[in-house]
Amino acid sequence: MSKTPLTVEQIYTLAYDCLRANGCDDANAAATAKTVSTAERDGSESHGLYRLPGYVASLRSGKVAGNAVPTVEQVTPAAIRLDGNNGMAPLALEVGIPVLAEAAKALGIAVLAIRKSHHFAALWPETEALAEQGLVGIACTAHTPMVAPYGAKKAFFSTNPISFAWPRPGKDPYVFDMATAAKAHGDVGIAARDGHPLEPGIGLDAEGNPTTDAAAVLNGGVILPFGGYKGSAIATMIELLSAGLVGDHFSYEAGEADNKDGGPAQGGQLIIALSPKLIAGDDWGAHSEGFLSRLENMDGIRMPGKRRHQNRLSTEPRFIKTELVEKIRSLT
């Protein structure tokens, strides 16, 4: 399969130019192109340029406003609402994260509830942005039904990801970003596109039978929750936090409202920031570092996020499937 070498800067420009050509203003195009190029930089193929045709589809269908200006409401000193005004999430996050961080540094804890936004990316950028400021970050969001609750054979949850980042002064943060599904929908899509089988236990086909065929999972089938009833319970929690608490769509509501153009659905996101300095005291860093150092030095351990942090140090080109690059250029 042919691949095209592109630098991170070229990936950014390719995404930016495509978004601008399809109705995004400068601010929205720049924020979204940064999100896309950052994913490719860090080795997350399923959240990089792979997502761009979906962004374009939603812009062309009118579902997403390419010139949206997010607005912030400080409900209380610790509770912040952000209305994405039907735009894409990257700009909403650029506007909201600094406000959230300032509140958490002053109060010890703060929450950001993002409404009427379209999230289509990884969650680690927002939690890492908080960790870089010495804050603990937790984020979760929902999308449209793709995952069957434990014991069911019909999709009801999204893949309902959750991200957590813990700051480590002088080091990369401890950070994970994971779906509560047995496999992220984007990764199932990559497997279907490339003809790779899924591992057993990932999904069911349209008849409710276990399958390793990614295309069968996507075409009328469902993804399963990770860990059976445990993953299903966490997925339920994320629905309640990112929809019930935020005041936006649950996954089934997003699915009913979405125009099925292949792009991101409207939904909410909850982000929590905590200050370990204010909550635990000045020795929080040394105390937690003792724990994390012991953990990462255990035989056989690979810390979450480590490969991503290593990938971003490389200045070498990233190799993108030529077919995808040509498709994006055709959309510009």
Image (spheres, rainbow, N blue to C red):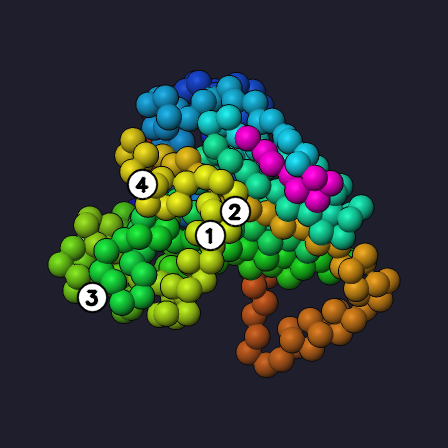
Q: Residues within 10 Å of mark 1 (few under 14, many from 20)?
A: some
Q: Which one is nearer the viewer's eye here, 198 or 282?
A: 282
Name the residue: 55% across, 78% down: 300
Element type at marker 2?
A: loop
Task: Using residue 173 as the reference point, say whether residue 46 is left or right of it.
Answer: left
Q: Residues within 10 Å of mark 3 (few under 14, many from 20)?
A: some
**Closer mark to the observer between disc 4 and disc 1:** 1
Question: Which residue position holds label 3?
Answer: 210
Say if mark 4 contacts mark 1, CB within 8 Å: no
The C terminus appears in which quarter of the rendering?
top left
Please give the range of residues in magenta: 76-83
Q: Is residue 139 visible?
A: yes
Q: Residues within 10 Å of mark 4 (few under 14, many from 20)?
A: many
Q: Residues within 10 Å of mark 2 (few under 14, many from 20)?
A: some
Mark nearer the N terminus (2 vs 3):
3
- Tell me the distance, in whole angstroms, between the alpha carbons under discs 1 and 2: 6 Å
Name the residue: 63% across, 50% down: 272
Residue at the far right in the pictured view:
282
Question: Which residue position holds label 4?
Answer: 255
**Closer mark to the observer between disc 4 and disc 2:** 2
Question: Which residue position holds label 1?
Answer: 240
Mark nearer the N terminus (1 vs 2):
1
- Tell me the distance, in whole angstroms, between the alpha carbons under discs 4 and 3: 24 Å
Name the residue: 32% across, 48% down: 145
Q: Position of residue 120 (x, y in %)?
A: 44, 40
Question: Which residue position holds label 2?
Answer: 245
Q: Is residue 171 visible?
A: no
Amino acid identity at mark 2: Leu
Q: Is residue 77 magenta?
A: yes
Amino acid identity at mark 3: Pro
